[in-house]
């Protein structure tokens, strides 16, 4: 757990320095940023420069909800709206 906190602190500090040093007028690629954060936090889930979801699932353990019944707020076009918001 301590390693993950150090990795997160390092990632946060690097991102803060990068944001302070330059102003970029292009859109953020949130998906790539989140994937990079996962790779830093959970180095063991990376296989051939890709995320291995089975390994991620194993690392997260009981925190993964695989139950078929759970409340889910959804609507037609939700995925498209999320992509547009990013």
Image (cartoon, rainbow, N blue to C red):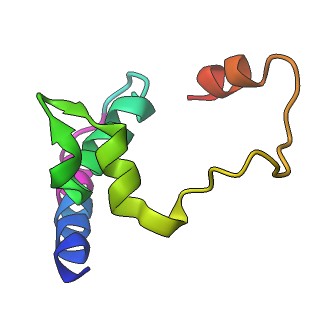
Estimate the x, y position of residue 2 in percent, counting from the top left.
21, 82
Q: Is residue 34 above or below residue 67?
A: above
Q: Give left or right: position of 24 versus 61.
A: left
Locate the N terminus and report the quarter of the image it occupies.
Answer: bottom left
Find residue 85 and report its image quarter.
Answer: top right
Find residue 29 and report its image quarter.
Answer: top left
The residue drawn where x is 82% and y is 44% is 72
State the residue lying farthest toward the left: 48
Quick check: is 69 in the magenta stretch? no
Q: Is residue 26 above or below residue 37?
A: above
- Our reading of the magenta stretch's main secondary structure is helix
**78 or 71: nearer the eye?**
71
Q: Give left or right: position of 4 versus 75.
A: left
Estimate the x, y position of residue 33 in percent, counting from the top left.
33, 38
Estimate the x, y position of residue 11 in percent, counting from the top left.
21, 58
Q: Give left or right: position of 60 versus 51.
A: right
Locate the C terminus and report the quarter of the image it occupies.
Answer: top right
**13 or 51: nearer the eye?**
51
The residue drawn where x is 52% and y is 65% is 63
Q: Give left or right: position of 64 versus 75.
A: left
The mark total stands at: 0
**3 or 32: nearer the eye?**
3
Estimate the x, y position of residue 78 in percent, counting from the top left.
77, 25
The residue drawn where x is 54% and y is 57% is 64
Region rendered in magenta? 14-23
The residue drawn where x is 38% and y is 25% is 25
């Amino acid at each position: 757990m301590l390693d993950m906190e150090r990795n997160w602190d390092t990632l946060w500090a690097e991102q803060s320095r990068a944001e302070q040093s330059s102003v970029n007028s292009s859109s953020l690629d949130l998906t790539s940023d989140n994937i990079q954060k996962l790779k830093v936090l959970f180095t063991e889930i990376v296989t051939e420069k890709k995320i291995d979801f089975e390994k991620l699932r194993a690392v997260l353990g009981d925190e993964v909800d695989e139950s078929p019944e759970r409340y889910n707020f959804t609507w037609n076009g939700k995925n498209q709206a999320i992509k547009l918001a990013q």
